[in-house]
Amino acid sequence: MEHLFELTLNFAANLNCKNNGCLDCATCRNTLKARYPNLYVLEPLGNVITVEEITELNYLMSISSMNNEFKIAVIKEADLMSDITSNKMLKILEDPPDNKCIFILLAEDINNIIKTIKSRCQLYGWIFKGKELERFDKKFADIENELKKMLMELISNRKNITAALNFSNYVYGYIPKISQEIIKRQKKEIEKIKKSGLDEDDIERMIKKNEANNKREISKSTALIIKHVFDIITDYFEDIIAVMAGSKDKVLHYAGNYNIISKNFNGEDINKYLKLLEVIRENKIYIKHGINCEIALDRVILGFMQL
């Protein structure tokens, strides 16, 4: 998100710069610091963006701009808007305070933005391979192979209760490790804030913001882990369906699974597996709306064992 926000500030500076985005004038320098009178940044304080926060932003955007420049509102983590907040934002986009307003919504998962808002925006996709994401990818790669081995055990023997429990327990055991690392880092950050020399009110405000940011990071990391797990499960079940439909190993996600699938799923009702694939997709959607990830995962694994 920080890389995306940095790009956004560069874009905002270019809009109001009198020198074609020189990045050196007072307008550019202050915009890049996110401290410019015609720039408003909404950063959620909790796990969701509230209606009150959107209402306040709309009021700020209704104030006349300085020097007749563009008024630019940047909403960080716009995918945290609830349905009610999204509808409030939609009305603002449909009827902005004036024609000098520009709203920029930043989101890591655009699928969590309602369709009506997306239809009223110009959409751009960016992939930033920052250090945090690289570290996360490396950590997840460590467990990905283990998850695949466990899925192979389930495919080989659907009555293997131990394999099913091991799969779920392995995923559940990995999630707290991510949280512990974030919490450990948070404690160090809070110690730095306390030693910053700021007054007590500023320190308390910064600590609350830090805690809220880390809480959101834990939530997003958990959702990302579960998404990856469900993606792997989806690939395996698509391979099962493909083989049952007569496909060869070359079209599979995991060609090495072909012989085991052919041996264990020959002559079965393909419709049962198509329905289970829909269950997997449904649970991926449920996770986005806050359902317990353990319940979603158990529903899929147990559903497979009962076929």
Image (cartoon, rainbow, N blue to C red):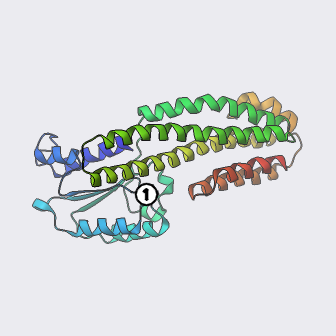
Tag count in the figure?
A: 1
Tell me, yes or no, if residue 266 can be seen here. Answer: yes
Residue found at the far right of this picture: 267
Q: Quadrant of residue 69?
A: bottom left
Q: Nearer the viewer, residue 95 or 180?
A: 180
**Relative horizontal placement of residue 137, taking residue 166 as reference (left or right):** left
Q: Residues within 10 Å of mark 1 (few under 14, many from 20)?
A: some
- Give the residue at x 79% y 47%: 304
Place of residue 301 in the rendered image (x, y in percent of width and height, measured from the top left):
76, 46
Kindly state the secondary structure of the residue where label 1 is placed.
Answer: loop
**Relative horizontal placement of residue 239, taking residue 60 as reference (left or right):** right
Tell me, yes or no, if residue 248 can be seen here. Answer: no
* Amino acid residing under circle 1: Gly
Place of residue 184 in the rendered image (x, y in percent of width and height, measured from the top left):
47, 37
- Give the residue at x 45% y 46%: 214
Image quadrant in which the N terminus is located: top left
Residue at numbered disc 1: 46
Place of residue 235 in the rendered image (x, y in percent of width and height, measured from the top left):
68, 40
Place of residue 163 in the rendered image (x, y in percent of width and height, measured from the top left):
80, 37
Q: Is residue 240 above or below residue 215?
A: above
**Relative horizontal placement of residue 188, taking residue 220 as reference (left or right):** left
Q: Quadrant of residue 101?
A: bottom left
**Relative horizontal placement of residue 292, taking residue 110 as reference (left or right):** right
- Give the residue at x 82% y 48%: 270
- Give the residue at x 42% y 49%: 211
Q: Is residue 60 above or below residue 251?
A: below
